[in-house]
Image (cartoon, rainbow, N blue to C red):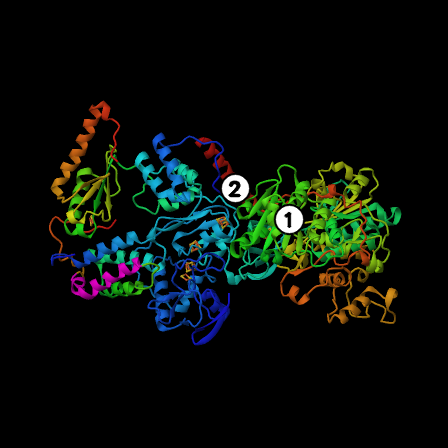
Amino acid sequence: MVIDDQTCMVEFALRTMSFYAHESCGWCIPCREGTDWLKKTLTRFHAGFGTRSDIDNIQYLAENMLGRTFCPLGDAAAMPTIAFVKKFRKEFEDHLNGMPCPFAREGVPQLTVV
Amino acid sequence: MPDVTFTVDGKKLTAPAGTLLIDACRKAGIEIPAFCYYPGLSLQAACRMCVVRQEKVPKLQTACTTTVAEGQVFITESPEIAQARKATIELLLGNHPLDCPVCDAGGECELQDMTFKYGAGESQFVEVKHHRDEQQWSPAVFYDRPRCILCYRCIRMCGEGMDVWALGIHNRAADSVIVPNVLGTERGGQQLDCEQCGMCIDVCPVGALTSGSYRYKTRPWEMNHVSTVCTHCSDGCKVTLGVRQANDGSEIVRADNRDKSGINGDFLCAKGRFGFDFVESPDRLTQPLVRNARGRLEPATWEHAIRVATGKLKEIRDTRGGNAIGVVGSNRTTNEENYLLQKFARTVIGTNNIDHERTTDYASFARALAGHTGKTASLRDIAQACAVLLVGGSPTDEHPLLAWLLRTNVRLNRARLYIANSKTIKLARQAKATLDLRRGGYDKLITSLDSGRTEFSKAIFAEESLIVIFGEEFRGPAVENLIAWGLKRDNVRFAYLGDHSNSRGAADMGLFPDLLPGYIPVTAPGAFAEYPNLPAAPGNSLPQMLDAAAAGDLGALLVVGANPVSHAKLDPSILQHTFLIVQDLFLTETAALADVVLPAASLYEKSGTVTNTFGDIQIVRKAADRAGVKPDFEILVRLAGGMGIDVSTLVPFGKRGTTGDLGQSRGAQSGEADRHSVWLEANGLEPKLSPFDPLAALDEIERLVPGYTLDRVNLFAGNDVHTEPASPGPESGFVPVSALTAPELVVPAHDTLFTSGALGRYSRALGQLEQHQANELAKSELAKSAAD
Amino acid sequence: MSPKKAKSEPATVFSPELAARFDALVKKYPVSRSALIPMLLYAQDEVGYLSNAVVAEIARRIEITELEVRNVATYYSMLRFKAAGKYNIQVCTNISCMLRGAYEVYERFREELGVGSDGVTADGLFSLEEVECIGACCWAPAIQVNYEFHDELKPDLVPGIIGAYRQRIEDRAQDPFQNKEKDA
Ligand code: SF4
Ligand code: SF4
Ligand code: SF4
Ligand code: SF4
Ligand code: FES
Ligand code: FES
């Protein structure tokens, strides 16, 4: 997939995680609770209510899902998340301090998660 | 499976190949945490708490699904594993409410324990937690979704264990939720239409499923935990009662068997788990009642009541003879009480007019097996049997533990269950083959078994060993025929089903007009010849006593824990010329007619032993206490004392020589207490110091009653000890008498899951459950007729 | 407590064709409960949603409990327990579609229809749903209306799509032979 530099990676991480949180079957604890927690945190974070410790916590949660779940869906949710935080930490930090999403464009609704 | 050797944390362990690693570790004392694993239920691998490191395997493995093989190497504790477990708990706690201070599970919650152990004490979780209101699914079962960790133990227990399948899981991911089988409507929430056993609550590792009778009442550390035996059906589940101080004694707040000791493991049915509240019933008698000059029952002191009762008993005995008095015993009192009651009748009153409300024909069973040993099956035998033939009855309702053990044996050990019945019973789902006795009835059983033509009979004959379980459908000669059929083959053992917690004990202890304890005929009393003044002729059975009462020939009737007026559907007026003494918990139909009513303790308020219908003896320990009542044992001793008897002739107690004959003589002249103490010494036992100590009677039972030679170490440790009724055999004087063991004397109780004779009527919890299930039934009938 | 067999065959909630189809379907699998998911889908297409009566009849047909039917049915988000609109508009907002403006499209549907996610318009004609990938990523953003796809969407195209469906209903109302619609 090709993504241009106008795409918010936090939003991207959030949308990815809401997908996994929806698809998780709920069988095992790490996947069921991990995807739900990450989705909630990323939603809040993207809306500008994040804290610096959230960034580490996102990585911590994802790393603790990896390899611990019943099926590979948990791994699939954890791996990109770890990569997003590691590779795009700067974009996460740009959301801190109540700042609105730097990529927000006129007329584009903020991602709401159902 | 051959044994294999593998290494866990540097220790070499050995276990049969294919054993689950978690089981092998637990056996070796290596604790592996687990939420979803539950022994005996299918595997889930859902909670990921049991992760361990296996050599040469890239990911952590779940110990609950890993089977051991030769040469494997495991590590169960390391920083990596501790972190994995800690993280799992952190994730769980994310959505978990901070309920511990009010949660029922607090103090015995597996999540609390693990949080403590793995130190997931701080939470990074700042999001909004999922919330859902607590739901009540039945009078017994409440569900609090936020506390649920989705281990699926409850679903599996209900489905696999109970074969009810009333619980399910809806939705998915974080919205997953445990649901009961009846859909909510605008008029009410979701409901459970099930057997209401509470097993789901029992296995829930957290406080998500809570019990209607226990919730928010107390905390585990505020209770005393007393292990005793259930007082309801005749299967004899071991039950741990949680007891707490109360204003008028101590009250039972919970019943379970979480330590899994006893033949029932963790199983209890609705009656055992919730039906203990009859002891708290406001209708409980707590004061003796004596009928006054105006013909009303009025409260009296124990001294007065005993004086009135014994005065009259003595007067009638002395003027009209002992046979003008009758005695009716109970199916729920202890062996010691039953033994004492018959001894009281025979030696103090001087009559063989003693009987009980027979729910099955144990006397014929004993007679049919006389002289054969090793032919009765204990519950443990049944739990492990390769093949069982179940004839008649409906164990799911009448013998819930038996049904549980049969189901479990089929499920886990692939036992073969054969069912011959005139109805379709629920256990047929587990049966390998069924024989429909709708036509022909039970008389035709042996013929069709012997025919060798049907698949059913062929399969039975192919079995190398067999346990035959049958019930009141077989009485008198039918019992003998069935047993004779089995005795012709090697390796057939029997179990005979009766009702109520100690009906077998009542029979074993000789509550018969013609049989002494151990089914010894009164006409050939053997060792019982030492009873002073033992009347030689058989007495009257219960119906005969009632006939005598109607004819005005029964001067007095002592009824202990029985209700012949309701049981035999009597016209109350026939007792108007009989002086009636009743010992009971409640003012039953019979007690209401009595001249003296003596308030008795329930099985949960006294100690002793009981024998289940399979002949397994267990120890009963006093758990609760109720001011004003006395155990039947003590009441009987007081009645004997009131009649001027030296109670040491009735209950052997006291130090050697103090009440006896100072040891000058032995044999027929020596006093019972002294004889007893000689026996005690020979058996390395202590003398009993109080006449109210039922263990003194147990000593005598062991000394005199054939078959009751007990393994005391096991018995007192709380284990079940098997006895056989027929050990003496004809050569030791077991001669069949007994026109009196007539089939029509047997009136089975046919209890359901929620009834239990008088006890059930006074249990609010059971009443509510019965009502709930009746409503559910009515609703589903309604829905069905609407759909048609 | 247990799946009870009906004494006589009770009336079915399905059309004779679907009932016959189910009769055949159940026999097709070694274990009849394998037919559960296809049955749920066909039943929803015909009845519109999984009513209590639908659940009860499916349970009866494959001899499992209603609880088990619901265990499965509640798992899938495409199975409904409430009626949707005549035209159920499913807007994909997954990654590819999102990157190409799915949320703008979705937002426009909300405005035009005046309903939120999972909402049904007052006239019962339309319902709106946000869904995961519908397999049309190459032509993102895409939506699915009942079984019809619309792709390469822009917010401005939304009123036209809605209008076309409204038109279709009006046409049908005037054509007595077309009254019975087959969208499937
Ligand atoms: S279930 Fe356990 S951890 Fe949860 S609130 Fe109850 S006691 Fe606390
Ligand atoms: S109470 Fe017993 S029968 Fe009822 S849902 Fe729980 S486990 Fe199943
Ligand atoms: S209710 Fe209890 S037993 Fe059932 S899934 Fe939840 S935590 Fe496990
Ligand atoms: S099965 Fe019988 S003994 Fe066991 S709990 Fe139930 S009533 Fe009591
Ligand atoms: S106990 Fe092994 S995963 Fe739950
Ligand atoms: S992401 Fe929308 S169709 Fe695949």
Horizontal placement of B602 versus B138: left or right?
Answer: right
Magenta span: chief secondary structure? helix
Q: Secondary structure at mark 2?
A: helix
**Amino acid type indicated by mark 2:** Gln
Q: Earlier in the sequence, mark 2 or mark 1?
A: 1
Q: Quadrant of the C terminus of chain B?
A: top left
**Amino acid type indicated by mark 1:** Arg
Q: Secondary structure at mark 1?
A: loop
Horizontal placement of B202 versus B501: left or right?
Answer: left
Q: Which region is colored magenta?
A: A72-94
Q: Position of residue C101 (x, y in %)?
A: 14, 49
In this orientation, which residue lies closer to the viewer: B374 or C55? B374
Q: Which mark is residue B284?
A: 1
Q: Is residue A9 magenta?
A: no
In this orientation, which residue lies closer to the viewer: B569 or B636? B569
Horizontal placement of A1 versus A56: left or right?
Answer: left
In this orientation, which residue lies closer to the viewer: B715 or B160? B160
- Residue hosting label 2: B773
Q: Residues within 10 Å of mark 1 (few under 14, many from 20)?
A: some
Is residue B278 in view from this perspective? no
